[in-house]
Structure formats: C-alpha cells, structure tokens
Image (cartoon, helix red, strand yellow):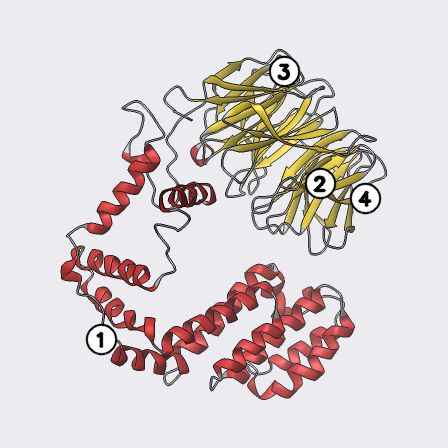
Amino acid sequence: SGDVGAVTEEGSENRTGGSKVFDPETTHVKREMLMLIRQYLEETGYFSTARVLDDEAGLKQSEGEKSSAQMNRLSQSILQGHWDAAEEHLAIMNHAKSPRIRYLLARQQFLETLRTGEREQAFFLLLEKLQPLEAYEYPEGDYQILCYAATCPSLEGVEKLKGWTMHGDVTLRGNLVDEVLNILELDEYGFLNEAICRATTESKDIAPVANIDRGRLIELVQQAVHHQMSRFSGTGVVSSDSVSLLRDFQPPVTPNQNFRTFTGHQAPVRCVEFLPKCGRFASGSSDNVIRIWDIKNPDRCITTLEGNVSSHLWSFSCASKSPHIVSSCGDGSVKVWNYDKGACISTIFTHERDVYTVKLSGDERHVVSGGFDRSVRIIDIEKGAAIMTLKGHDASVSSVQFTPLHNVVVSGSNDGSIRFWDLYSGACIRTISKTNAEVSSVALNQRGNYLLVGSRDHCNKLWDIRKNKVLQRYKGHANLSKNFIHCSFAGRDDNFVVGGSEDGIVYLWNTSSGVVMHRLVGHSKTVYRAVWSSSQSLLLSCSEDRSCRLWCDTHYNPG
C-alpha cells in the first residue's frame, strides 16, 4: 500500500545516503522479476506458460517495448477521457486499423457528450469526426443509430444503446480500452505482433534461470510477509488464513485497550480521520480548528488549520492521495485545505445554512455535501461551485457517502429516510424509508453491497442493498439525542462494526452476529465517531470531552 511504500522508501534513503535500495523501474530489476516468475511457473508445472513468458521477455530492448509503452499511453488517455491525446498516440502507432479505432474513440466521445446534454458539441462530433469514418463503423449500421440517437430526448429511448446507458463513463471507457487492445494485439499481421517477432530474434542476453536458487520467489514473499508481521507481538495470533498476497498483512485483531490520548482542542471533537501518510491523523472540533497529529507523539500537533472563526465546523473528509481536507461549516460553506501548507485554498458557498456532512470523491475532483436546507449538493472543486442539487428529503441531511464506483451518492436524513442518487441523471433511484428513526450516519462496506445505518433509536442497522432488507441490528449503545453519532465498518474484511455512544463508550460489534465484542472505556462524555486504519490496525475515536483516543489490540506493537 501507499503507507508501506512510504515507510520502505524512507528507510532505504536513510541507509543509502539518499538513493533507493530497490528501484522497480530499472531494467535489470524488471528482468529479474520476470525470471523469478518464469522459474515459479516451471517449478509448479506451467511449462507452456513459462515458454511464452520466456519468448516475450525479449521486448525489453526492442521495438516491442516502444509499442507497449505507446499502447499504455493510449489506454490511459482513453480511461481519462483525453480524446485528443488518444488520437495523437494512435497516429504515432500508425496501425493499419487506426481508422476503425478512431471511429470507436469518436463514438465514445459522442455518446458521452450526448448524455451530458451538450447537443451542439455532439452534432459537431457526429458530422466532423464520425461521418468521415462511416466506412469503418462497427457493427454495420452503427452510424445511422448514432444519427437517430442525436435526435432523441435521451439515450434511454434508443433500443440498441440500452446496454450503453446502464453503465458509467469509467466502465464504458474500460470496455473501449479492451476493444482497442483486441484490435491492436489480435490482428494477424498487426503492428504489435510484428514487433514481438523482431524482439524475440533481437534479444539474446536474457540471463539463464539456472542461476537462481530454487524457490527464490517464495522465499522473497515469505520475507515480505515476515516484515509486515513483525509489527505484531505474541504467538498464536496469526493463522495462514490471515495472509493474502493481494494486500498488506492484516491480522485478525480487534482493539481492546487505550493506546494513546490526544488533547489540545478547546471544545468537543466531532470528527477524526487517518491521513494517507502513515503516522498522522486529523481532528476537527467545535472550537472551529482542524489539527494534524503525530500518532507516535500525543504532545505534538503538527499543523493547526484555522479559518472557521466565523462559522461552526461540523465535519470533514480527507483526500486519500493529496494533502487536502474538505470541511463543512455552519455558514453554508465548504472549505478546501492543504494541510502540508497549513492554509485554506478555497471556500465554496453552496448551502443556505449549516452544512452538516461532506465526502470527497475518489478522484478528488468532486465533493458531496448535505445540510440543514434538506438538499444534497455535488460540488466541482476546480470550478468552485455546486454543479448539481439533489432534493427530496423532508428534513436536514445528516450524512452522505459515495458508492465505490462513485456513480451513486447515498444520503441519510433526519426525516428517517435514506436516498440513493444517480449522479448522471440526478434522479433518486431508491429510497429506504423503514428506518423508524432519524438517521445520524450512513456507511458502505468495501464492496458496496451492504449499508450500515446509524439512527437515533439506540440501534445501528446493516442493510442488504440488493435485497432492500435489514440483515443485522447492533444494540447496547446510547443514541437518542440530537448528536451526530456515527458508526462504520472496521477490521479485516469489514468483520466488525464500530460506533460512538452518548455514554462515553466506544462499541465494537461482530458484523455477522451483532454481538458486542468490546466496550472501550476511556472517554468521559459522548463519543461522536470511531474510525479504523487497516494499514496500521488502529482505532481512532473522538469525543465531547475534547480528546481523541487511539485504541489497539494487546497483541499489537504499534511502536
């Protein structure tokens, strides 16, 4: 993960005076990685696959390497919707079937433009780009279908494009990339195949696999797992079922003791989040200050973000890649902060009164917010304005979330309902109105098929979104007043639920059974929120008592 990578690089620089010990971009490292994979394939009986890999390994110093790099640039341009750049990369490749691919690129651009309602631009693309390439249409008659689509009120009215309307731009661009790669790679006499043939005859300097110790790849993986496991003390805690090569090591631990306490705020602390750089977290308080903390040093506040003096700070959302925090305020504004610089870089007024909740999108370009005025707003950060207003709730909006694909927003309200909003049409596509109480928080699991709802009836509920029914209830805590008390998924594979309570206790429930696993005692007043860090196996809570607390497992050695 990014956290582990950061730590590894920092340690490497310290030992080598500024240079990395391991650079995966160097030619010899890339070649050695391929050799290790080839050896593993042979040792496990995949001899034919090993031969194929051995043949293709010669692309490193040949024309094939250039072709692959160009193809990668073309794919990235398509996925990002940079159509002019995609055409430039295609022109450089000079493939025999470039016109057919140009038609597919223009088709995708045309349909995306039509879906967003930019009809003038859509007609321009139809006449200036697609019509000259009509001879390369696929399937036959596709151009006529597009002409008909340009005259329809919406794409949903075009029968042969119904499959296209069921997906978002990201999915459709991914499908387009697959289709383009098929055209380029599977053409019997295509450019890339010719390059591969030349590459396999030109490259003669591949080191023999016989020089590698048997089982070397497994040995290196075991070393990496051992390094990650070294953060955990004790024996008998970890089983082989806990180890996956597809993600960082996360033992089946549950926080059961107070690790560190952070004080410094002058009013209740309403929100906390771990920051992407390992070893830091942010806290937001009713004193209208956001603080950045060093996890290892409770006495060290790294940065203080002040600028909410005239308005109440309700919540914030931290970016996963950049040093940005988006906060919501009582004056109807949303503020964007750069915590590395310690400055507010943008203030966007969107709501009529208090903004109670905000969430940053995965691409960090948009923010969803909800507030006292009963509306949900979609904000374009670059434009500094709301680009969509979603109305339907009958009371204040208390919590919002993007789904994992970022094509739907989920909102919870004091009217007791939960609404799902399609971000392409702005329509409410589903409403859950059986919560029986005001909703204080909504949270989705990693896969996006379960919704965790916190409500002011002393009960958190787990909803199956597809079946539209409650699977489990989590009780024992207190949540009945006007406080915004949140609950969320935590642990390896979202195997437990954490939440705050008005009795000052952090509650942990087993996700499947609903049984209370731990009651973490330490705060003296209402606990508003608790959040989990999968990379550090730590739980972080904030409270009305003006403090933040870190919780860990007794078997865990946080350092």
The tag earlier along the polypeptide, 3 or 2, is 2
- Nearer the observer: mark 1 or 4; the answer is 1
Residue lying farthest to the right in this orientation: 352
Tag in front: 3 or 2: 2
Amino acid on which disc 4 is placed: Thr
Amino acid bearing label 2: Ala
Query: Closer to the camera: disc 1 or disc 3?
Result: 1
Image check: 394 left or right of 268?
Answer: right
In the rendered image, which residue does mark 1 sit on?
Answer: 204
Image quadrant holding the N terminus, namely top left
Look at label 1 and name its amino acid. Answer: Lys
Dot 4, crowdedness within 10 Å: few (<14), some or many (≥20)?
many
Q: Which residue is mark 2?
A: 343
Q: Residue 216: horizontal and vertical position, in percent?
A: 20, 50
Q: CA distance from mark 1 to mark 4?
A: 63 Å
Taking the image as shown, residue 297 lies to the left or right of residue 188, namely right
Q: Which residue is mark 3?
A: 478
Q: Is residue 388 above or below residue 184?
A: above
Q: Mark 1, mark 2: which one is toward the viewer?
A: 2
Q: Which residue is mark 4?
A: 350
Of pointers 3 and 4, the one earlier in the residue sequence: 4
Q: Earlier in the sequence, mark 1 or mark 3?
A: 1
Q: CA distance from mark 3 to mark 2?
A: 37 Å
**What residue is at 54 percent from the left and 43 percent from the top?**
448
Which of 323/42 is in front? 323
